[in-house]
Image (cartoon, rainbow, N blue to C red):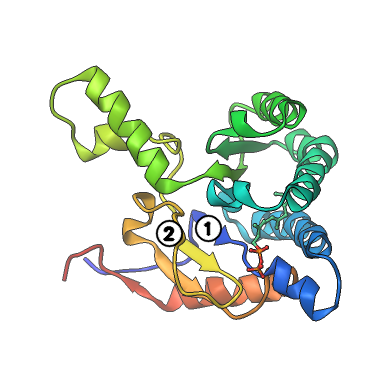
Amino acid sequence: MAEKNALPVNVGIIMDGNGRWAKKRLLPRSAGHDAGMKRIVKLVRHAREAGIKYLTLYALSTENLSRPQEELDGLFALFRKYFEVYAPKLLSENAAVRTIGDISALPQDVAEKIAQVCSRSPRDPDFTVVFAVNYGSRAEIVRAANFAAELGGKMTEEGFARLLYTSDIPDPDLIIRTGGEIRLSNFMLWQAAYAELYFTDVLFPDFTDKHFDRALKEFAGRTRRFGKV
Ligand code: FPP
């Protein structure tokens, strides 16, 4: 049966447009990422207050890792700050912080900090923020396929989904992409099978809580059929 939706359980955000936001202001790209992180801090709080249970943020794609070292260093500095200052606050408020992707390719101190903070997440959180870091959906699927081959035998969809990074995370109901491009860019391709997609030209640093609410409102008005009539 068709379902009208009140609130998505898991909202994914492809946070695009930091570089263009900075360029418009004649600032270095790193200033766009700084502004993006400030937005993340506020959006996480807002999404939680809105009743969202999982917020999945595409923070660094596998492809992003080939950006100039100077830009990467700026991003890694932001990860350090986020996981030193902001993530522990979430943990103390019964929220969990997790990652999907291969963090082992990050500078060792950043990878260790992230792993250490995530491991302190509460067991029964009422809200979870998931950072996709050095994440690529195709690599995730191939990794799962290799696990499946090791296990042998036939795979079901449910069994395969349990081999993904997101094994215990619900599929995103809504995926928002800021910055004007209309594509998924290797983000949660398996998990997005029935996600509602929402694209906006607003650059991520300008994507306010109000813009987020607008996406939720549009989601609530859509009819999801999950392939049925
Ligand atoms: C895409 O914008 C955004 C990124 C590659 C990085 C997203 C990261 C943040 C918002 C801050 C990171 C901080 C934490 C703690 C996760 P772009 O640079 O590709 O923008 P452009 O398309 O305008 O060039």
Nearer-the-camera pick, 82 or 70: 70
Mark 1 near ligand 1 (CB under 8 Å)? Answer: no
Give the percent coordinates (x, y) of residue 219.
Answer: 46, 72
Query: Which quadrant of the figure contains the C terminus?
Result: bottom left
Q: Nearer the viewer, residue 15 or 39?
A: 15
Q: Is residue 221 above or below residue 196?
A: below
Badge 2 element:
loop
66 up-or-down from 194: above or below: above
Residue 29 visible in the displayed image: yes
Of 134 and 176, nearer the camera is 134
Residue 100 spot, x, y in % from top left: 53, 39
- Left or right? Give the position of 81 relative to 138: right
Around disc 1, counting alpha carbons within 10 Å, would you say few (fewer than 14), some (14 to 19), or many (20 or more)?
A: many
**Which residue position is annotated with label 2?**
173
Q: Residue 214 sits in which quadrant?
A: bottom right
Mark positioned earlier in the residue sequence (1 or 2): 1
Left/right placement of residue 185 relative to residue 85 reads left
Q: Residue at left 79%, top 71%? A: 22
Asked whether the residues under the numbered discs 1 and 2 touch, taking CB atoms below 8 Å apart as contact, a structural biologist would say: yes
Residue 34 at x, y = what percent? 82, 58
Q: Residue at x 62, y 72 (%)?
A: 213
Q: Which residue is mark 1?
A: 11
Farthest-out residue, left: 154
Viewer-proximal residue, 94 or 17?
17
